[in-house]
Amino acid sequence: MPSDVDAVQLRGIGKRFPGVIANHDVDVTIRSGTVHALIGENGAGKSTLMKILYGVQRPDDGTITIEGKDVVLKSPTEAIDAGVGMVFQHFMLADNLTVLENMVLGAEKLHGIGDAARTEIRRISDRFGFDLDPDVLVEKLGVAARQRLEIAKVLYRGARIIILDEPTAVLVPQEVEALFVNLRELKDAGNSVLFISHKLDEVLAIADDITVMRRGTTVGTADSHTATKRQLAELMVGSELPSPETEESTVTDTVELSLDGVTLTDEFGRNLLTDLSLKIRRGEVLGIAGVEGNGQSELVETIMGMRIPSAGTIKLGDQDVTHWHTRQLREAGIGYIPEDRHRHGLLLDAPLWENRILGHQTRPPSAKGMWINRKGARQDTERIVADYDVRAPGIDTPARALSGGNQQKLIVGREMSGDPVLLIASHPTRGVDVGAQAAIWDHIKRARRAGLAVLLISADLDELIGLSDTIQVILRGRFVGTFEPSKVTPQDLGTAMTGGEAA
């Protein structure tokens, strides 16, 4: 239950970087024993504020009060000691270490590194339904399991104030409900949760209090019991909530991508994909729904030539491309938006114009003969920045300096350049605000009308239903259901995704 002492008070917080004011005059009060939602566009200053509360960065102005005591947090270690834990949107895990080793890394003094630590991990896992095996390598985990591990790490360290940055991005509706049950249990025990999300229906469902940020400062608060999604969206971006719904069908008879009986096995002979067949036609968006870790990543990697199937064929148009390399597929006209923009989509410390070249280094305007065409790449980056509303000081800005939404718009612009015949879009709007989300939806709709074939993989079931012409559900590497978007609900998909029904 809430106590008389607020968990956190942020007063007059300001943070400046060269040429950028990230935060100015920010005020936030998080009551003890509550879930407090923080919403705003990408670039509104939320991430900077959270890094200040977690000790990653120090404010230039303002004060931080935690549980009634003024504090100066010089590092995450000091924040953890003060009872603040943070789960970042982009995971902070070592792939070559086990679940146990990741959990205890930096916290060896709590429970050691042996049986006591293993017992505590299993206790947390069992209590919150995380299904974590302490001895599994993290590189073997899917995105959803990595998210659960990050949350478990915070709980393992005994945090009383927990910052969750987009924690539901990889969860189906039933799993979101289960998480919300756990969050309510946490707050009932006196813990406080700072919940950052772009899914406004989730914010209204779980939050006790809502703070809205825009352009680096707080612009208002809202009561979750009386606020609406439209009101929150207008506070965030000054416009109504966007919809992913497409117009009339643009599907043609020309097949751009076909899979016939594709099976993929791992090094132990186990099937990762089993007998997958599909067709995507020009002007069609085929959506793939599934709980993370059920073969979506392997499907994309197989189509993109990163894995070779053990059986079946893949055709791009009339050409058999089953054994083509990734470069050949890219040159044949496949655009690719990866599920993790930081790990697979960008060189974070490279300027925007160099990121424009990635995956397109053999074709104009990025190449001229055998050489990189620096001038052409820079000019085309300027075009992408303008056409896709990538908000950056200039094309020499490192990708790391952009907000998540602007990083994603840069990738979308890059992958839709050069007139691709097929776009593989894996979670294209994950972790972006409603403004960037609407822009990306519009680009996909426009490309669909122009004849682009799209394979859309998304954990946002409303997005899948709104954008897709057909939806396939994948479970344990098999297609288990085909759904017509106009007749299916997110709950129907969630049930099929967890093995409740097949269609």
Image (tube, rainbow, N blue to C red):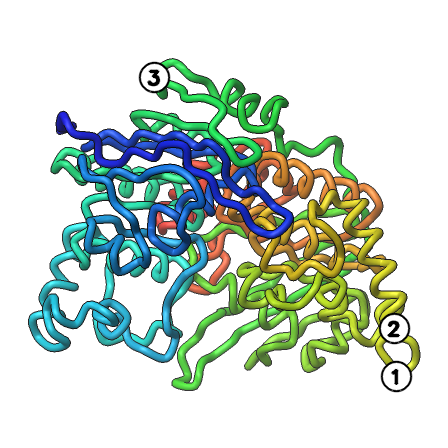
Q: Secondary structure at mark 1?
A: loop
> Which type of secondary structure does the marked residue at label 2 adopt?
loop
Going by the image, does 361 lie left or right of 191? right
**Residue 37 in view (yes/no):** yes
Q: CA distance from mark 3 to mark 1?
A: 61 Å
Local packing at callout 2 (Cα closer than 10 Å; few below 14, some 14-19, many 20+) is: some
Residue ID for mark 2: 373
Q: Position of residue 475 (x, y in %)?
A: 43, 58
User: Which residue shows up at 41% across the image and 61% down it?
Assistant: 91
The front one of 129 and 227 is: 227
Q: Residues within 10 Å of mark 3 (few under 14, many from 20)?
A: few
Identify the residue at the far top of this view: 226
Q: Which residue is mark 3?
A: 225
* Residue 202 at least partly seen: no
Amino acid type for the residue under numbered disc 2: Asn
Q: Answer left or right for 478 relative to 281.
A: left
Residue ID at (22%, 35%): 7
Q: How many C-alpha atoms fall within 10 Å of the one at disc 1: few (<14), some, or many (≥20)?
A: few
Q: State whether residue 235 is above or below residue 453.
A: above
